[in-house]
Image (cartoon, rainbow, N blue to C red):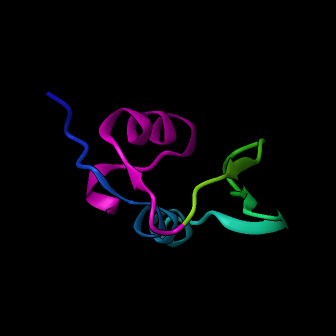
Amino acid sequence: MSTWPSTRANRVYQALVKIGWKPVHQTGSHIKLRHSNYAYAYTWAFHDNEEIGPKMLARIAKKTGLTPSDL
């Protein structure tokens, strides 16, 4: 059983910004985020009201350092 709940994309995006990811470039609905502790950029490609499931949240967390308590 996953520790990640299903949640809306805008809530996840706000949590990423809160833990230090900053938007640096946007093309359409794709937002490139950078963090000072990571050497790479993460591309955010979700619309605000999309529902993100536990598996996708786990993938996002693996690349960004997001934790369930950040949501």
Q: Quadrant of residue 35?
A: bottom right
Q: Quadrant of the N terminus?
A: top left
Residue 62 horizontal/vertical position (percent) = 49, 34
Q: How many marks?
A: 0
**Relative to 1, is 59 on the left or the right?**
right
Residue 58 horizontal/vertical position (percent) = 39, 35
Q: Is residue 64 magenta?
A: yes
Q: Is residue 69 magenta?
A: yes
* Residue ranking furthest to the left: 1
**Relative to 11, is 22 on the left or the right?**
right
Q: Is residue 31 above or below residue 39?
A: below
Q: Quadrant of the C terminus?
A: bottom left
Q: Quadrant of residue 51?
A: bottom left
Q: Is residue 18 above or below residue 63?
A: below
Q: Nearer the viewer, residue 15 or 47?
A: 47
Residue 19 horizontal/vertical position (percent) = 50, 65
**Relative to 45, is 26 on the left or the right?**
right
- In the image, which residues are magenta? 48-71
The residue at 69%/45% (across/down) is 38
